Each structure stands twice: as structure tokens, then as C-alpha cells.
Amino acid sequence: MESRSGLPEGVQRFEAVLRQARAEAALRGRRVRVTWRTTPVGQMSTGRPASDSAEAPALLELAIESDPLARPGEFDPLRLPGLEHRELAEWIRLERFWGGETVAAGAETTAAGWGSSLDFAGETDAAEGRLVFDPEGRSAGVRWLVAAAEPSDPRLYLVELDGLTGRVRHRLLAPEESEEWLEGGGDSVPMTPGLPVFPTPPSGEAGEPR
């Protein structure tokens, strides 16, 4: 029986945003950046920001390199037609992630070199990460541990992006797997076979459901 938390639908919407962001990069011939923020359950209170605080950051932020010749490395906000990606936080939250670029507070991003393997261990505790789709639709290979925005729903999904092909797929973790992944035990688990890691080149300028 499905929970009313909307977790499965939220996962599908999350995947749809990733697919369309990749499509926009290829269609416009411009780099598209996807930035995400994790909210582990231990950092949640009521699940909502205080009413007197500034608007909470969106779970995902999208940006496009509008003019790579005149303003290389400068990204402008991007809205995807028909997709309100800023509303994803009403459905899901991201517990952990592996791959992509790790964004440290007040610092530049860190990323693996182009064509090298990513060390998933050591990146799982980062609160913010990002990837960049190039005009050919390539990006870093990333996996996310996705939970419901409603803390009472214990289910977890593993979502994986194939950075080379752009394929996104997910699976619902069995209860016995969830605790291991929450504790970072997935660090040593290889990417799903057939999902190669294709990192975004470092720069100072900076799938179907199962």
C-alpha cells in the first residue's frame, strides 16, 4: 500500500528535472548546471523552515551558461517549461549523494578530473553538490539517496544518473538495505552495471524507472 507522502511521485519528478535539464543543454548548445542540497532527517525539525526566516533554499537549483563567449563560466537561473523544480522539496528530500562536484560552504567546488574515476567515499557527508551537463548532454555520474519530505515515511530510493548516456533510473531500497545506506555503507558499492562514471571537467569557472 502506497504512503500518502508522495515519495514515488516526487522521485519521478526529480528524474524528470534531470532529464529535461540535460535536454536543455543539448537543445540550446549551452552548459546547464544542476545544484542540489541534502537535508538528512537528523537536521529536520518540523520539516518546515521557521516562518520568520528567509525562504528556505530550493532542493534543486538550475542555471544555464547563457553566453559562453562573452561571459564564460557565468550561469543565469533557468526555469524548465512545465516543471516547477523548486517545489520538489514538498515531495522529497535528499539524504546523501555520491559523485558529482562537492560544494563546500564559502569555497570553490571540488571535482574529479575529466575521464577519471570518482572516489564516492568522502563525498557522502557534503551538504551540497552539483553537476554540469555539457552541450553534448554529458555530465558526472551521480547517485542520490532520496527520502520522503514527510519524516514518517521510512522508505528510501536510490536514484542513479549515467553521466555518459543521461539515463536515469531508480530502485526502492529494501528495509534491510536502508540503514546501511543511511550510515554511508553504500560508499563501497559500485555503480549499477552499465552506468559508467563520466565526470565533469574541473573548472575555475565554476533513464527509465524500474
Image: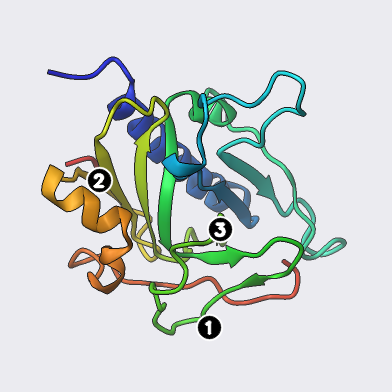
Q: Look at discs 1 and 3 and give the one toward the viewer.
A: 3
Distance, label 1 to label 3, CA atoms, is: 16 Å
Counting residues from the N terminus, which is met first, the one under dot 1 or under dot 3?
1
Q: Look at discs 2 and 3 and give the one toward the viewer.
A: 3
Can residue 141 be seen from the camera position used here? yes
80 shown above or below 43? above
Q: Give the SS element for disc 1.
A: loop
Distance, label 1 to label 2, CA atoms, is: 26 Å
Q: Give the SS element for disc 2.
A: strand
Distance, label 2 to label 3, CA atoms, is: 19 Å
Q: Please rate how many residues cluster around mark 3, counting C-alpha atoms within 10 Å: few if below 14, some from 14 to 19, many from 20.
A: many
36 shown above or below 54? below
35 shown above or below 115? above
Q: What residue is pinned by disc 3?
A: 129
- Name the amino acid type tagged 2: His
Give me the residue at 25% from left, 45% from top. Answer: 170
Residue 185 placement (x, y as % from top left): 26, 65
Q: Please rate how many residues cluster around mark 2, counting C-alpha atoms within 10 Å: few if below 14, some from 14 to 19, many from 20.
A: many
Give me the residue at 47% from left, 63% from top. Answer: 138
Q: Are marks 2 and 3 in contact (CB under 8 Å)?
A: no
- Name the amino acid type tagged 1: Gly
- Name the amino acid type tagged 3: Gly
Q: What residue is pinned by disc 2?
A: 170
Give me the residue at 27% from left, 41% from top. Answer: 156
Check the picture and name the quadrant holding the N terminus. top left
Residue 67 placement (x, y as % from top left): 79, 55
Q: What residue is pinned by disc 1?
A: 113
Q: Give the SS element for disc 3.
A: strand
Residue 115 placement (x, y as % from top left): 44, 82
Q: Are marks 1 and 2 in contact (CB under 8 Å)?
A: no
